[in-house]
Amino acid sequence: MYAIAIHGGAGALPAQGLSGERQQQYRESLAAALDAGYAVLERGGSSLESVVAAVRALENDPLFNSGRGAALTREGGAELDAAVMDGSTLRAGAVAAVRHVRNPVDLAQRVMEKSRHVLLVGAGAEEFALEEGFELVPNAYFRTAERQAELELLRGGRSVSELMPSPQGTVGAVALDAAGNLAAATSTGGMANKRPGRVGDSPIIGAGTYAKNGVCAVSATGHGEYFMRLVAAHHIAASVEYRGVSLQAAVHETLHERLRALGGSGGIIAVDAAGRISLDFTTQGMFRGARDSTGMRQIAV
Ligand code: ASP
């Protein structure tokens, strides 16, 4: 059995709804990323390789809030966060507030594999990227006209859903491979109009990203401050492992009861050791997809 799930962010839908054409674009992008991750599993590759492949595809796609097309800080720059976790070893790698790394998820994996650390931020992360031979790009590479328009709306005190065709659009993937290994990856530009230096839940192991073999792999999207305070991804894994509840029940309780009680909203994708997938959210919508070796394949906006 092998399985993968992806998300492209959870949030409010635009007041006028997503146009048919726009929906189609999102579906195609999600399908391409899902299939890129699934192809790795199909040829016997690891869940870690699979989640990185899916997230990299979404980072390169300007429709989503990660890599190119990332949400902008209140000063108009992009500051990117990403994390990966390998459930078979409990090793993890993450980067935060990087401004010049084209694919932050690749750097997060490199931090895990080649450094003695788990989380590198800002200039130090970029120095590491240079040493590792990563190609750096100008910060403007990440900025799109849509994100600029979004920032201007938010600066003017208006809500993004008045104009924006998309929810926030952080991306993530979770997978179980044929060898039974679980992995998770998440990548984001964070919250639009954030203060420079702000770091959300995505690169915080246990908050927005977590994986443990025999238990589950989790990737979150939504208002990061709340996911951090709940240590949401680890809370789900701990619920499955110690309380013996199903993955679906653990995800549901975390989102609909605990997160909601704090005043937060968002979505979670997760897969357990048997390949059961949970895609859940408290927001109006979540871009998502899932596929497994029984032939199940779904994409939804
Ligand atoms: N969770 C992300 C953050 O707070 C944002 C998102 O998922 O849209 O940085």
Image (spheres, rainbow, N blue to C red):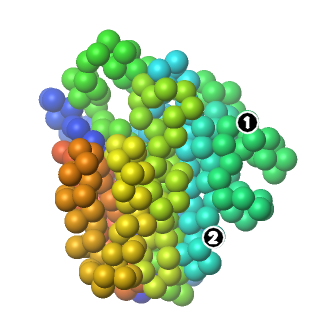
Q: Amino acid at mark 2?
A: Arg
Q: Residue drawn at (72%, 59%), measured in percent from left and top?
A: 117
Q: Could you tell me which secondary element the residue under label 2 belongs to?
A: strand
* Percent position of residue 232, x then y: 37, 60
Q: Nearer the viewer, residue 301 or 124?
A: 124
Q: Residue drawn at (63%, 70%), measured in percent from left and top?
A: 91
Give the label on residue 68, or none. Answer: none
**Where the N terminus falls, by quadrant?**
bottom left
Q: Is residue 108 left or right of residue 72?
A: right
Give the label on residue 91, or none. Answer: 2
Q: Amino acid at mark 1?
A: Ala
* Percent position of residue 172, x then y: 44, 56
Q: How many marks?
A: 2
Residue 148 visible, this orientation: yes
* Percent position of residue 250, x then y: 27, 71
165 over 157 or under it: above or below: below
Q: Residue drawn at (30%, 76%), measured in percent from left and top?
A: 247
Check disc 1 and report the residue beneath it.
Answer: 123
The residue furthest top is: 156
